[in-house]
Image (cartoon, rainbow, N blue to C red):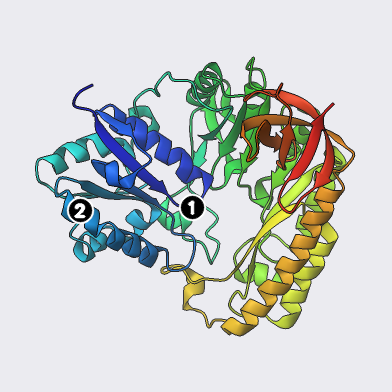
Amino acid sequence: MADTRKLFIKTYGCQMNVYDSERMAEALGASGYALTDRADDADMILLNTCHIREKAAEKVYSELGRLKPLKAANPDLKIGVAGCVAQAEGEEIMRRQPLVDLVVGPQTYHRLPAMEEAVRKGARAVDTDFPEEDKFEHLPEPPRAMRGPTAFLTVQEGCDKFCAFCVVPYTRGAEVSRPVARILTEARDLVARGVREITLLGQNVNAYHGAGDGGSWTLARLIRELARIDGLERIRFTTSHPNDMDDDLIAAHGDEPKLMPYLHLPVQSGSDRILKAMNRKHTAESYLRLIERLRNARPDLLLSGDFIVGFPGETDQDFEDTMTLVRQVGYGQAYSFKYSARPGTPAAERPCVPDDVSSERLHRLQALLTDQQRAAQVAMVGRDVNVLFEKQGRTAGQMTGKSDYLHAVHVTDPSVERGQIRRVRIIESNTNSLAGVLV
């Protein structure tokens, strides 16, 4: 179309923000916008923000400052801030940065077309409500274009756990699960457009309780139904809470072949005292027993986790308890961070552990986790795994993809095509990937 406008979206944070950015693009596509990968070529720029890490808001303001030359060169350029920082800051963003034309929270981006229209008429728009309507019901149908072999699919949003360090309940709201029928429709559409692997998303995804035939469905029942879709070969889900890993979901890891043997299950700390202060409502021992049950169901399960070091009040012994738990579990990979206070959360009011102490602890923890990750990768050498190939590699004839265990795998073979699942023998472990040959 001659009047097509260009949209640039910069996405911060988790997989759910990636999914949200795709849906924002679809919503604005109905208003005549097409995506561009160049900010300097855009008619509208959206920053889809995350509020989990320290100084997230200040990073957004810094990014907005870098956009000032683009706005000066093109006064008609529209700039918006979306996501969790938008939800938390709202009018403050408008006050501090006059170049921002619209601010929209993660629960109201279905209203973007109306907001964009108002902005084009000269208004500045802010919408950070927690609306009663389901935003997904008001989003346009996705375009029918083919897409890559993997996709994210949000099935649950928000969280009712209120961990003392976490801002999600305040920026994403209470737990809400999407209806089964809408998820299945979206999944079938993705598969029809070339998707072979779907990762189900939620801030607390295993708390899923969506309305379906016969009442409320669990995540395990949803996974079993998705597995019946012809052409959908792989299913994953993230992120989970230990307290919502029910018997049926544990069983699904052992008896549903399409559910991949990889699980991200954050524990945050190995100290019961710190877990209580975090309001996690589980203990280190209950977590370890849960891991034992999961591995009994699926012995080759690769585990991932999250850890926070330097949480207010953490002692040397508390940290050593975390190191002990990590050694007992043996993670295939994990993410670890120094505690950062999020405004408005209970832990933000507590005295902090000195930064040098937190830094030293983080260094030690990351060294242990890196050793475990390398060991898990080395253990794959000589094994045959299935790999879903996603894109060309760095060298001629090379294709890269992900194994069942979410390891990055590359193969040099001209017969490999994007979207294929091929059997691969792992021959070498590199720093962050595995090399293989077709079996």
Closer to us: 79 or 213: 79
Q: Place residue 41 in its image quadrant.
A: top left
Asked whether, in this view, residue 115 is left or right of residue 132, the answer is left
What residue type is disc 1 on?
Answer: Gly
Residue at the image position 51 percent from the left and 39 percent from the top: 156
Q: Place residue 270 in its image quadrant.
A: bottom right
Q: Position of residue 218 (x, y in %)?
A: 62, 33
Residue at the image position 61 percent from the left and 33 percent from the top: 392
Label 1: element kind: loop
Q: Which mark is residue 27?
A: none
Q: Position of residue 114 (x, y in %)?
A: 20, 36
Mark 2 closeness class: few <14, some 14–19, many ≥20 residues within 10 Å: some
Which is more foreground, mark 1 or mark 2? 2
Closer to us: 288 or 15: 15
Instruction: State the residue position of label 1.
Output: 13
Are the two marked residues, 1 and 2, in contact with CB atoms closer than 8 angstroms?
A: no
| Image quarter hosting the N terminus | top left
Q: Is residue 107 visible?
A: no
Residue at the image position 22 percent from the left and 62 percent from the top: 97
Dot 1 or dot 2: first in sequence order is 1
